[in-house]
């Protein structure tokens, strides 16, 4: 005769009760780790937890990566132990608070707090947070390659550079405080100094100037460098609109004036429409194009030389004719 098999559920239930009791002993473990701290300053790390009334704390352990650098055990004497991997300020640290002083960039990484309850449960929980030590640039970002005057239709090209930081600064361009869209931006890879390990950021701009860019004849272009919430600096460059100059001429009587519009000469580089991005060696203005005034002077010089040559040829012809007449 077939009989149904009855499962013994006592052991699984007992395990669930033990786990539930352990979870009630230690709970709500959490940490507060600053995401970014300036180099040379101190960092305050907090570890919070809750224990049942009948439970006691066994230990608090702090790790950088997988290496323990701080331990607090209230039942031991001394209760505080510090290991050499991180420079801890003992006088300001306790079971829930650790202070790391004189931060260097090499202490960036993951920090974990491990909380253990005392017997009989010895329940343990661990939580983590990431911290980055920032070394900001020594100066504001620099703007290079731009000119002081542009006409609508010219190409505005330049570089923004932020030197010697860790991590590399995030650069952005704006025109009249309006962000420039990505298609007019050239992002270069950061340049790392092999000796210091610091990075230099470069961001290029290549945009066609329009009349709408000028407000009361001026255009403001700004480059801003930021690193998280620790560093924010900017540099500005003001550009004037290069407008045509008006020359007026007339008769001696002062009537029937004729206005002549003479376009101003563009002193900078002749824009290359196919060159969409700025080369990393910087912008160099091309000053080789002669102006209309210099061309007129050259033509006048050539005319004078022609007249001089004509006079010389005429004198030589007269002298030769006189010699022939005298000889004959």
Image (cartoon, grey):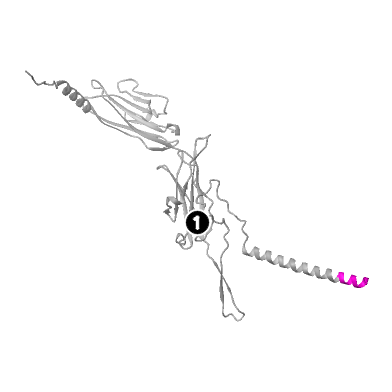
Task: Tell me the quarter of the picture where residue 106 sits.
Answer: top left
Q: Residue at x 77, y 67 (%)?
A: 309
Q: Nearer the viewer, residue 227 or 208?
A: 208
Compared to residue 68, the image places residue 232 above or below, namely below
Q: Nearer the viewer, residue 180 or 164?
A: 180
Is 193 displayed left or right of 124 in the figure? right
Q: Reply yes or no: does residue 326 show up in magenta.
A: yes
Task: Tell me the quarter of the picture where residue 302 sits.
Answer: bottom right
Magenta residues? 319-328
Is 251 displayed left or right of 153 in the figure? right
Image coordinates of residue 207 in percent, x first then y, are 48, 54
Q: Residue at x 55, y 50 (%)?
A: 283
Per the image, the residue denoted by label 1 is 238
In the orientation shown, which residue stands out farthest toward the bottom?
253
Q: Nearer the viewer, residue 244 or 76?
A: 244
Q: Reply yes or no: does residue 258 show up in magenta.
A: no
Residue 221 visible in this rendered orientation of the protein? yes
Compared to residue 14, the image places residue 301 above or below, namely below
Q: Quadrant of the C terminus?
A: bottom right
Q: Residue at x 67, y 65 (%)?
A: 297
Residue 104 visible in this rendered orientation of the protein? no
Image coordinates of residue 82 in percent, x first then y, are 39, 24
Q: Circle 1: is it few (<14), some (14-19), or many (20+) Cα within 10 Å?
A: some
Task: Tell me the quarter of the picture where residue 90 sits.
Answer: top left
Image coordinates of residue 128 in percent, x first then y, are 33, 32
Is 204 displayed left or right of 42 in the figure? right
């Amino acid at each position: 005769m077939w009989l149904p098999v009855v499962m013994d559920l006592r052991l699984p239930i007992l395990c669930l009760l033990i786990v539930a009791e352990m979870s009630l002993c230690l709970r709500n473990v959490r940490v507060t780790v600053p995401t970014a701290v300036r180099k040379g300053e101190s960092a305050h790390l907090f570890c919070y937890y809750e224990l049942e009334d009948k439970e006691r704390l066994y230990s608090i352990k702090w790790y950088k990566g997988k290496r323990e650098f701080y331990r607090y055990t209230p039942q031991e004497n001394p209760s505080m132990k510090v290991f050499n991997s991180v420079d801890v300020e003992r006088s300001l640290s306790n079971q829930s608070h650790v202070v790391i002083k004189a931060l260097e960039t090499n202490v960036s990484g993951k920090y974990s707090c491990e909380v253990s309850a005392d017997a009989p449960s010895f329940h343990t929980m661990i939580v983590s947070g990431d911290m980055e030590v920032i070394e900001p640039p020594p100066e504001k970002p620099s703007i290079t390659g731009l000119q002081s005057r542009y006409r609508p239709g010219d190409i505005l090209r330049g570089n923004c550079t932020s030197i010697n930081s860790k991590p590399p600064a995030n650069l952005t361009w704006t025109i009249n405080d309006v962000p420039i869209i990505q298609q007019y931006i050239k992002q270069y890879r950061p340049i790392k100094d092999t000796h210091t390990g610091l990075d230099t950021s470069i961001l290029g701009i290549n945009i066609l100037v329009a009349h709408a860019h000028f407000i009361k004849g001026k255009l403001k272009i700004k480059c801003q460098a930021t690193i998280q919430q620790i560093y924010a600096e900017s540099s500005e460059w003001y550009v004037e609109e290069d407008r045509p100059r008006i020359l007026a001429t007339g008769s001696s009587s002062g009537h029937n004036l004729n206005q002549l519009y003479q376009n101003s000469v563009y002193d900078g580089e002749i824009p290359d429409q196919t060159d969409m991005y700025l080369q990393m060696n910087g912008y160099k203005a091309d000053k080789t194009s002669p102006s209309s005034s210099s061309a007129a002077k050259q033509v006048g010089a050539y005319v004078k030389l022609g007249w001089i040559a004509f006079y010389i040829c005429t004198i030589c012809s007269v002298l030769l004719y006189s010699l022939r007449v005298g000889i004959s």
